[in-house]
Amino acid sequence: MEKPHEELVTTAQAVTLEPSPQQGTNPDFRRDLAFPTLSTAMVERLHAYGKEESFSEGLTLYTYGDKDTDMFVVLDGAIEICLSCEQKSNQVFRRLQRGEFSGELSLLNTQRSVTDARTVLDSRLLRISRQQLRLLMRAEGDIANIIVSAAIWRRIGIIGDPSMGVVLRGCEGNPDLMQLRRFFVRNYYPHRLEEIPQNDERGEGVAATQLPSVELQDGRVLVHPAIADLADELGITELPDEHTIYDVAVVGAGPAGLAAAVYAASEGLTTIAIEAIAPGGQAGTSSKIENYLGFPTGVSGAQLASRGHLQALKFGVHFAISRDIVSAHQVNGTHRLILAGGKAVCARSVVIASGAQYRKLAVKNHADYENRGLYYAATAMESLLCREREIIVVGGGNSAGQAAIFMSGVAKHVHHIIRGASLESTMSQYLISRIERSPQITLYTNTEIDGLEGDTALEFVTWTNRVTGETQRKPIGTVFVMIGAEPNSGWMYGTVKLDGKGFVLTGAEHGFEPTPYATSVPGIYAVGDVRANSVKRVASAVGEGSVVISDIHRYIAQHRSSSNMNA
Ligand SMILES: Cc1cc2nc3c(=O)[nH]c(=O)nc-3n(C[C@H](O)[C@H](O)[C@H](O)COP(=O)(O)OP(=O)(O)OC[C@H]3O[C@@H](n4cnc5c(N)ncnc54)[C@H](O)[C@@H]3O)c2cc1C
């Protein structure tokens, strides 16, 4: 019996790609939702977007590593979707029958295919190109939801298979290995980790100097790969077409940027989002956001980020991930944003949503321990480092409060250090109450860290109470630093007006038009944490990102009519 559409639609909205720090088959994988059957009426509607083709048995439709693969709907016959796994022999993921369709997450983005597909009977298939798929996703809402839901569930199944994906090799605790892993996890890319114990000079015949490395599915090994090169290699980055003038370029894919991209693309504007690291921004590093409307039991930053990212992909947003914008200028009314590496993105309008980044500890050698004991995010991935250990959380804001509570469920004890005399004016009351009630957390007020020690990683931390002068030194190797943020605005110096702290000035007094998000440069708007005087919250970032698109519609329309008059 066919599944009712409602159930699938609901599922598409509910499912999310929560990056898992653990590897292994995902017990929550729902095969039934990963492989839905389209109704006859739906397949009929899809004919408007595709071309019927006949294939003989045993024909390869696409293989692992192929880019921009088409989607195939089975009209008659059967397709086998295979995972190329560790043993190099293919493992059947699914035999697709009539009414089922090929593709998984890479169908919605520019990632290279992570599966193979071939006919196993003489088959009649409906081939839908990427271009047509984009049209379909906008016009056929119910079918689009089924495709998105299936794409996510399939990726969940693939990620959960421990033999799948590229191999990330490195020495246990190595900061570069951790950074590469964070990149794969935050971009939900199938990978398996081979950690070599720290005291093991050689692992599987690989010299430690050749680590970390990434072995691609075709056997090539990238040693010490730069994130940007890896992103290009795997298709995670969609490098912009230099000849296209996008309606909107969004810089940063945190909550503000994702919201702007979703609204812009869903309203028919050609949109590109350029993101330096991975979608989600600061919110993506939060273990649980409890005050965002609509999530009564809270939502992890990773979930929120993956939902927003998928929603944007569904509406056809182009994503250049792992690329910083390094400068911006205007040429004949068009904005040229220069990416690290030199490529340019041209757009009629720009939304600056580059947010903020964490402040560092005022301890001279702090950089020596970044990712070697000092962390700026407290997600499930970092929690693995804390099991049964004493740890420190620094900071009096909500992010530090959340981290202290989250880690207190995993760590042996949490030492929570704040500079102020109390948490009252900086943290939400619900978090303060939980911290006060937790026997696993000790709060140190008027206190600052003034010493970090360790050979290759953090081993000892010293802190001092500035009122009493009392100093403590403890053997602690994990510190979460959450002491506020500075704007990511270096790339805008000399372009738009900034305030004394580097936040972007907007609004009637500073903007090129009297709207809240207009900057000093025509066509450039700023939203979210990077904007001076913004409320630094997920909901306000999402709100600003959504609202700014109405200004952009007006700006583009005016810009077009004045260019026509000048022509
Ligand atoms: C740990 C933590 C927990 C939090 N918890 C809560 C909470 O519970 N509730 C709440 O309301 N708020 C919370 N916040 C605050 C909230 O996350 C931020 O207010 C929100 O993320 C701001 O969104 P944004 O999109 O403006 O900026 P950001 O989230 O900072 O995103 C900006 C993005 O731009 C990218 N970027 C920067 N520079 C460039 C460049 N040059 N080129 C390309 N990309 C660039 C960055 O990589 C980043 O992904 C928390 C913050 C943290 C750190």
Image (cartoon, helix red, strand yellow):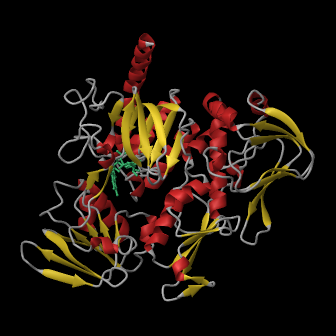
Q: Residue at x 34, y 75 (%)?
A: 478
Q: Quadrant of the N terminus?
A: top right
Nearer-the-camera pick, 496 or 81: 496
In the picture, measured across the screen, residue 285 lies left or right of residue 23, that is left
Q: Is residue 24 above or below residue 245?
A: below
The picture places residue 315, in percent across and down from the top left corner, at 56, 35
Image quadrant of residue 52?
A: top right
- Residue drawn at (67%, 53%) of the image: 154
Specify the quadrant of the image occupied by residue 394.
Answer: bottom left
Tell me the quarter of the image containing the C terminus: top left
- Numbered circles on residues, count: 0
Q: Position of residue 518 (x, y in %)?
A: 30, 30
Q: Can residue 366 be seen in the rendering of this structure?
A: yes
**Front in this rendered view, residue 376 or 467:** 376
Residue at image point 14% right, 62% down: 422
Whole-percent x, y for residue 75 in the image: 85, 38
Above or below, 244 against 34 in this view is above
Left or right: 199 with respect to 105? left
Residue shown at the point (42%, 77%) measured from the top left: 387
Residue 407, horizontal then vertical, whole percent:
36, 69
Q: Is residue 19 visible?
A: no
Q: Would you say 236 lies left or right of 47 here?
A: left
